[in-house]
Image (cartoon, helix red, strand yellow):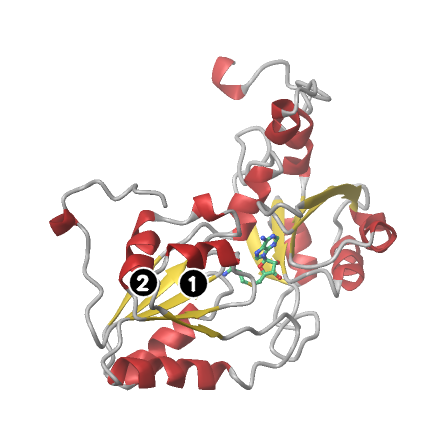
Amino acid sequence: MPQPLDLPPSDWPVLEPGWVWLCGAGPGDPGLLTLHALNALRQADVIVYDALLDKRILDWARPDVETIFAGKRGGKPSAIQRDISLHLVELAEAGKKVLRLKGGDPFVFGRGGEEAQTLIQHGVPFRIVPGITAGVGGLAYAGIPATHRDVNQSVAFVTGHDQTGEAPTAVNWEALAQGAQVIVVYMGMKHLDTIAARLIAGGRDPKDPVCIVASATNPDERILETELDRASADVAAADLSPPAVICIGRAVLMRQALDWQALARGEAPRNVDPLGRGQPAENR
Ligand code: SAH
């Protein structure tokens, strides 16, 4: 049992009866949980958790905790989202200390905002605990910085399907192709072929580097490097399955130098200067 909460107890917020804390749990690796989330785990009477959560995280909860699985897996219309939110209300109104634990960050494609709105409608007090989102932390485990001065001054986080389960019509992929130097797609595996085709139609280089990080930060993490015009075929050939984040853009090349998990295994970097810039920006 880890004991990282060595600050005086008065410095840690108390999860009061009748409150809901909406917490991010990070992308998987339990070590990526925040201290506020761990503090919440230790206090909660009841934990309502999602499908993508590493169950080892629940070992840090109180032994008498009640756990409720509120899993929804990608693509399905979420008719039950309202039920989950109302369940949180019921638990809080019953005087429980409620921890709503969500994968990644609760406010990044996590419906945390919707749940918080329902809590407000019912007068239930709540706290938001941010988490490490898969599109940043998952890429970092693959050795891909979400931003790098020699690559990008912007990064776009995009969902690969909308509430109908289709590639989102609200996203202007053709405009993104030109406007976003690095594109990070969540929930994009099912429609990767459509997404790639629309980006290429919008002028994106068909040979733009792509990296797919599946089950990022977890023991079954799998990483595939490919290019935009063959990404979908390569994913199928490699039999990669969700959850996965898809990074599109030259940031992917940095992995050739920064794949720290390979370096830790004793492998040499494939290319210390993948962008061909001679030396890092800070030395120029
Ligand atoms: N709130 C979450 C995102 C939830 S949407 C966050 O901030 O990370 C679910 C999508 O997140 C998945 O389809 C996938 O694209 C991504 N995702 C979540 N966990 C992941 C993981 N461990 N590895 C790769 N992608 C992950």
Report the amino acid beneath label 2. Answer: Ile
Q: Position of residue 168 (x, y in %)?
A: 65, 71
**Position above or below: 117 against 215:** below
Distance from mark 2 CB to nearest ligand 1 atom below 8 Å: no
Around disc 2, counting alpha carbons within 10 Å, would you say few (fewer than 14), some (14 to 19), or many (20 or more)? some
Of 100 and 69, the residue lying toward us = 69
Distance from mark 1 CB to nearest ligand 1 atom below 8 Å: yes
Which residue is depicted at the point 55% across and 86% down? 79
In the image, taking residue 223 as reference, residue 62 lies left or right, namely left
The part of the image, by quadrant, that contains residue 265 is: top right
In the image, taking residue 63 as reference, residue 193 lies left or right, namely right
Q: Is residue 52 visible?
A: yes
Q: Is residue 155 visible?
A: no
- Of badges 2 and 1, nearer the viewer stands 2
Of 51 and 277, the residue lying toward us = 51
Around disc 1, counting alpha carbons within 10 Å, would you say few (fewer than 14), some (14 to 19), or many (20 or more)? many
Residue highlighted by disc 2:
128
Report the amino acid beneath label 1. Answer: Phe
Q: Which mark is residue 233?
A: none
Q: Which mark is residue 107?
A: 1
Q: Position of residue 33 (x, y in %)?
A: 41, 49
Q: Secondary structure at mark 1?
A: loop
Of 33 and 256, the residue lying toward us = 33
Q: CA distance from mark 2 to mark 1?
A: 9 Å
Q: Position of residue 214 (x, y in %)?
A: 67, 51
Q: Position of residue 185 (x, y in %)?
A: 63, 56
- N-term mark: 2 or 1: 1
Of 240 and 284, the residue lying toward us = 240
Which residue is depicted at the point 71% across and 20% down? 271
Ligand 1's image quarter is: bottom right
The part of the image, by quadrant, that contains residue 99 is: bottom left
The answer to whether mark 2 and mark 1 are in CB contact below 8 A is yes
